[in-house]
Image (cartoon, rainbow, N blue to C red):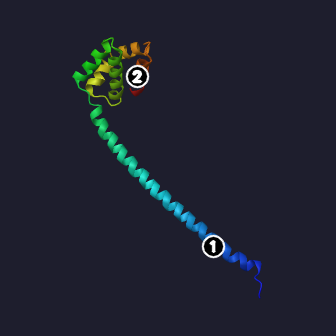
Amino acid sequence: MQRKSSRQLVGPTTEAGELRDQAHTEASQLRRQRRDRLLSSKRVRLQEQLEHEHEHEHECSEEEVQQLRNAMLTHDREAITQALHRLHHVVARPSAAVRRFVLEGDAMHFLGTFLQSPVPEHQLQTLWCLSST
């Protein structure tokens, strides 16, 4: 019986190890590419969906601005909170009516008043409005 040298033993084992590592690397690259494609397609779909939703969400007519103003004049906490919440959404991409309300109207006066409000939710929504402008 002929005994194999250590060099003969290491050769095939090393080749098999290298092949296994190479196959693992290729499989890993394929998984990464699939994951990247999936994430990219999800991002595109989500962005399109958000843009579509926000197109209609940010449109605010003169009548709606007047309703927001009237709600801010009330002493109803819930109405004020809802008006501030709506305002912080429409201020990000304002219509002409919202722009006039903020720049020429009394929106900044309201926001200053609600920033000092004892109601934490009013303060929070006011900060959202101010940070969106």
| Residue type at the position of mark 2 | Gln
- Alpha carbon distance from label 2 to label 1: 63 Å
Q: What is the tally of numbered marks visible in this picture?
A: 2
Residue found 60% across the figure and 66% down from its top = 21
Residue found 29% across the figure and 24% down from its top = 98
Asked if residue 21 lies left or right of residue 5, the reply is left
Residue found 31% across the figure and 12% down from its top = 73
Identify residue for label 1.
Answer: 16
Residue density around tag 1, few if under 14, some if 14–19, many if 20 or more, within 10 Å: few
| Residue type at the position of mark 1 | Ala
Identify residue for label 2.
Answer: 125
Residue density around tag 2, few if under 14, some if 14–19, many if 20 or more, within 10 Å: many
Residue found 36% across the figure and 24% down from its top = 85
Question: How far from the left and from the top, in percent, is residue 56?
Answer: 27, 34
Between 53 and 60, the one nearer to me in the picture: 53
Choose top left, top right, bottom left or bottom right for residue 86. top left
The image's mark for residue 47 is none
Between 87 and 4, the one nearer to me in the picture: 4
Choose top left, top right, bottom left or bottom right for residue 62. top left
Question: What kind of element bears circle 2?
Answer: helix
Q: Quadrant of the N terminus?
A: bottom right
Question: What kind of element bears circle 1?
Answer: helix
Closest to the camera, between mark 2 and mark 1, is 1
Q: Quadrant of the C terminus?
A: top left
Using the image, determine if residue 47 lies above or below residue 85.
Answer: below
Question: How far from the left and from the top, in percent, is residue 109?
Answer: 36, 13
